């Protein structure tokens, strides 16, 4: 959907009319590179032509029926192929709060998916998958919906913003149904959730010495922080903080009983920079001070 800028990050002010949080267009994609990102959600539908889409450093072919969700600050581009029928793409661009003001601090499609309107329909683990391919009747119905959105947006009849909001919600629910109609939604959700938890646990075990933020973990798992916290707690019965602490204290116990490192050095080795805080957390988990533990268990 971008114009002639390379790796530019677009904001709402580049597209939204004054006082609005939504933008609809129908565009012929160019053949030259125009990689870009944006600070809004884009749901694109390929209505005709042949070309490719680059997102997250990966390139794949697209054609009629491809429905693609692009989140905040994800570098991507659609490109037509010289000598082939050009790609024509509908774009629905919006800020999450356009759907509901309570989403004002949300920044990706998964946040919307977990919103109270949709959480019973669409597990968040699948919200971040960037490409949903539909064909036949589904393609026709989706294109008809985009045409109605474009007509409302272009002509601005009375109440058009409310109609656009309703159509955008209809589009999102249509995406949910496309997943559900595949008959594999539950299996994919369970498998994906398990993989996310295992990946997160492996990352924490390998990087426990570092200052790990929830924001960073949410970025590498492609889930919103609140949702990642919830499914991690459900799987491990521990919060992120509790899990990291258990890894660090376990390693500290090992070093106290098998090495001659000072307590201060051990605290630094397992990720603590405040010796008093380390002592407090150690006693909370083990029931005694690090020195007392060493005296009792030093081999």
Image (cartoon, rainbow, N blue to C red):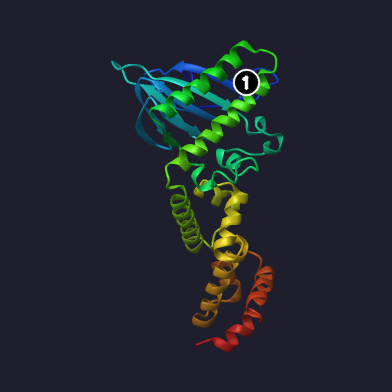
Residue 13 visible here:
yes
- SS for dot 1: loop
Q: Which residue is mark 1?
A: 16
For residue 280, above or below residue 37: below
For residue 253, above or below residue 243: below
Q: Where residue 162 appears, x then y in whole percent?
A: 68, 23
Q: Where residue 243 appears, x then y in whole percent?
A: 58, 65
For this view, does 140 lie left or right of residue 19? left
Residue at x 30%, y 17% (from the top left corner) = 84
Outermost residue toward the left?
A: 83
Q: Where residue 192 appears, x then y in whole percent?
A: 46, 52
Q: Where residue 26 appears, x then y in whole percent?
A: 49, 17
Given residues 47 and 73, the one toward you in this image is: 47
For residue 140, above or below residue 119: above
Q: Quadrant of residue 47?
A: top left
Residue at x 54%, y 74% (from the top left corner) = 250
């Amino acid at each position: 959907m971008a114009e002639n800028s390379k790796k530019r990050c677009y904001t709402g002010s580049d597209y939204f009319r004054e006082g609005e949080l939504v933008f609809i267009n129908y565009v012929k994609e160019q053949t030259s590179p125009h990689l870009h990102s944006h600070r809004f959600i884009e749901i694109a539908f390929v209505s005709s032509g042949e070309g490719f889409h680059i997102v997250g450093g990966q390139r794949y072919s697209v054609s009629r029926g491809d429905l693609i969700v692009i989140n905040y600050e994800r570098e991507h581009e659609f490109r037509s192929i010289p000598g082939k029928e050009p790609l024509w793409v509908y774009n629905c661009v919006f800020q999450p709060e356009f759907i509901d003001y309570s989403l004002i601090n949300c920044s990706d499609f998964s946040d919307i998916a977990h919103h109270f309107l949709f959480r019973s329909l669409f597990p968040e683990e699948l919200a971040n998958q960037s490409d949903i391919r539909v064909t036949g009747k589904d393609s026709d119905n989706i294109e008809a919906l985009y045409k109605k959105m474009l007509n409302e947006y272009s002509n601005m009849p009375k109440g058009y913003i409310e109609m656009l909001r309703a159509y955008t919600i209809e589009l999102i629910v249509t995406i949910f149904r496309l997943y559900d109609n595949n008959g594999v939604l539950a299996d994919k959700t369970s498998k994906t959730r398990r993989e996310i938890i295992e990946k997160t646990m492996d990352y924490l075990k390998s990087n426990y010495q570092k200052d790990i933020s929830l924001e960073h973990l949410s970025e590498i798992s492609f889930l919103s922080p609140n949702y990642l916290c919830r499914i991690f707690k459900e799987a491990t019965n521990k919060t992120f903080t509790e899990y990291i602490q258990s890894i660090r204290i376990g390693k500290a116990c090992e070093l106290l009983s098998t090495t001659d490192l000072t307590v201060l050095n051990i605290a630094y080795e397992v990720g603590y920079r405040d010796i008093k805080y380390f002592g407090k957390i150690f006693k909370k988990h083990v029931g005694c001070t690090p020195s007392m533990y060493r005296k009792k268990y030093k081999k």
